[in-house]
Image (spheres, rainbow, N blue to C red):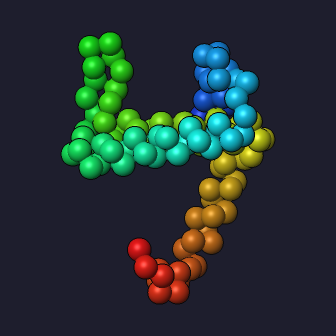
């Protein structure tokens, strides 16, 4: 499955579940929220996915998936071809200096 297919599916699902009328600020806040949830999983040693009794997956892997889903949803809404952009950025990143010129981690 390509990132563009994931993007279309993410946007369709978000629209179906009532998130189609959100604003760009909310899109980016939701990405930030998922990153915070992933951080909390990391801090709490929730490194593997566990599935709750209601079938909701939880844990760091699931939160990382949520980040990708949210980013893909935004890309679809903005008509961004993530397949092209991720490839372009990865090619460029491969040429960068170590720690981008001695930046701290």
Q: Is residue 12 visible?
A: no
Which quadrant holds residue 36?
top left
Question: Residue 52 at what x, y percent from top left?
Answer: 27, 20
Residue 92's place in the image compared with 10, above or below, is below
- The residue positioned 68% from the left and 41% from the top of the image is 25
Which quadrant holds residue 70?
top right
- Numbered-mark total: 0
Q: Nearer the viewer, residue 49 or 1?
A: 49
Question: Residue 29 at what x, y percent from top left?
Answer: 59, 42
Report the side of 48 relative to 6 (left or right). Answer: left
In the image, farthest residue toward the bottom: 102
Question: Residue 91 at what x, y percent from top left?
Answer: 61, 68
- The residue positioned 67% from the left and 63% from the top of the image is 88
Q: Is residue 53 visible?
A: yes
- The residue positioned 74% from the left and 46% from the top of the image is 80
Which quadrant holds residue 77?
top right
Question: Residue 71 at what x, y percent from top left?
Answer: 60, 43
In the image, farthest residue toward the right: 79
In the image, farthest residue toward the top: 54
- The residue positioned 48% from the left and 82% from the top of the image is 103
Q: Quadrant of the C terminus?
A: bottom left
Report the side of 60 relative to 20 (left or right). Answer: left
Q: Quadrant of the N terminus?
A: top right
Report the side of 25 relative to 64 (left or right). Answer: right
Q: Nearer the viewer, residue 84 or 73?
A: 73
């Amino acid at each position: 499955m390509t990132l563009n297919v994931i993007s279309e599916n993410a946007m369709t699902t978000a629209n179906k579940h009532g998130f189609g009328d959100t604003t760009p600020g909310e899109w980016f806040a939701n990405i930030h929220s998922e990153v915070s949830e992933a951080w909390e999983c990391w801090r709490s040693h929730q490194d593997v996915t566990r599935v709750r009794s209601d079938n909701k997956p939880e844990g760091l892997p699931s939160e990382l998936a949520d980040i990708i889903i949210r980013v893909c949803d935004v890309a679809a809404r903005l008509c961004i071809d993530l397949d092209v952009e991720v490839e372009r950025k990865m090619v460029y990143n491969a040429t960068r200096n170590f720690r981008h010129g001695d930046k701290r981690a």
